[in-house]
Amino acid sequence: MTSPSLTAITRATLAKDLRLEWRSKDAINSMLFFALLVVVIFAFAFDPTAEESRRIAGGLIWTALLFATVVALNQTWARELRNNVLDAYRVSPAPANAMFISKAFANFIFVAVLQFLMAPLFVVFYSLRSVGPVWQLVVIGLLANWALVVNGTFFAAMSIRTRNREIMLPLILFPISIPALLAMVEATTQVLTGDSSPRFWIQLLAVYDVVFTVVCLALFETVLNAE
Amino acid sequence: MSSSDTSAQPNSGSAPAVSLSDITKHFGRFAALRGISADFAPGKLYVILGENGAGKSTLLRIVAGLLEATRGTLTVLGSTNLRDVAMRVGYMGHAPLLYDEMDALENLRYFAGLYGIHDDSICSEALARVGLDPTLKRRVGQYSQGMRQRTSLARAILHDPELLLLDEPFSNVDVASAREMSRLLGVMRDLGKTIFVVTHQAPVMEPVCDESILISAGRLAERQQGIPPHLLSPYTQEVGK
């Protein structure tokens, strides 16, 4: 028997989370239907022209993904509360951060799958055609995805022991996500319209990701063991 | 030891496996534990009895490191930092602590990884020891309550802990299986493990119990060799009789 390493446990926990999601499809299904509803309802409600679409699509895409992510985040931790499985992790010598990193990566994968599935729908429903380089949208997508899930995973863990956690999570998460949301919307809009360079907003998003990843890693053990 | 003796002493010359000094736990204004002090010698099987809400599970969770005492000092296997000895402690909770969507072997394989164990045969052996078929591919969510309890026990013992903490291991387990589990615990005790069992089914544990501890209203009310007759009946369920 050897001391468990952070990498090995992170990998095992990530594999376990992906397996559980593959079998239950709790998070993906609820995220997908939620995001789909937002896209369809807004498309019918506004019926925008191609030019208008380029201006509003950034806000629409990230608002839909933010709300859909919250649904997935609640599911991720609810799974650990069923049968009190989290206690089995807490009594083990496994490092707390392995749990956090694996959960954040799992959520990253779920949101990435959602982005991949929703992107063609946005193009079709809003007649989107990017004026700026599309590869920048991929970079923005990855950075924005991490910004959503790193804080989301952390605050979802904070709210799991509260009675109204489905309400508590957005109440805590949304205000703190405003700088990231602003950056991802502005960057996306600027790439789609080609009005100006999205560089500043991409940098802001990258700094946000680094800062919050470090803070979450530093505080997660306290959150995991809080009574 | 009389009922008034609440500061129990170790029964052997060796260092205690668990030492409690003035352990107090408050949940808001409710005092779940009120200044429990006791030393527990290693290599013994202790049965913790008491009515519902007496503080038995709270005490076990504090020893496991899942709750922090409001006041007092806890030493487990010679360390006051429970993270340092987590590798040597096994805990089985009131809930099964298993993922419903995975089968028993998948569950054990994952939890074994948390202890640095990457050998499937150890997981299979743990399942076999509690009387389960390691090749069974059914998901834990489809198990009977008794099978879940046994899988949970297998999870708790798979890393061969020196100290084993079991909270209601026999709830919803049939009499024959409960006796089989208690026999296994007796064997583990004979191999030098220290075992604490919180239960309402004292008669099941009677043949293997070294000491019984009665918790009442958050206090250590009584500590006896074996399980005396007056503790066998009031806190038991029909299943053990």
Image: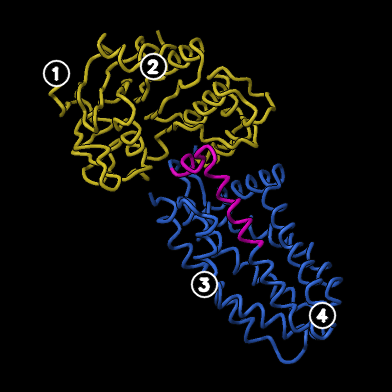
Chain colours: A blue, B yellow
Left or right, B198 with reference to B159: left
Q: Chain of mark 2?
A: B
Left or right, A38 with reference to B107: right
Is B111 rendered above or below residue B176? below
Q: Mark 3 to mark 1: distance in Å?
A: 59 Å
Is A8 rendered above or below residue B63? below
Q: Is residue A57 magenta?
A: no
Residue B78's quadrant in the figure?
Answer: top left
Is A59 rendered above or below residue A220? below
Residue B166 image label: none
Is A157 rendered above or below residue B21? below
**Residue picked out by circle 4:** A48
**Residue picked out by circle 2:** B201
Q: Main secondary structure of the magenta part?
A: helix
The spot of residue B102 in percent (x, y) is 64, 35
Which SS class for mark 3? helix
Q: Are there few (<14), some (14-19), or many (20+) residues within 10 Å of tag 2?
A: many
Residue B59's quadrant in the figure?
Answer: top left
Look at discs 3 and 4 and give the one toward the viewer.
4
In terms of depth relative to the viewer, which is nearer, B183 or B1?
B1
**Callout 1 amino acid:** Ser
Q: Are there few (<14), some (14-19), or many (20+) residues within 10 Å of tag 4?
A: some
Residue B209's quadrant in the figure?
Answer: top left
**Callout 4 amino acid:** Pro
**Callout 2 amino acid:** Gln
**Residue picked out by circle 1:** B2
Q: Locate the N terminus of chain B by quadrant.
A: top left
Q: Mark 3 to mark 2: distance in Å?
A: 51 Å
Q: Mark 2 to mark 4: distance in Å?
A: 70 Å
Q: Are dots 3 and 4 in contact, CB under 8 Å?
A: no
Q: Chain of mark 3?
A: A
For the record, the magenta segment spans A68-90
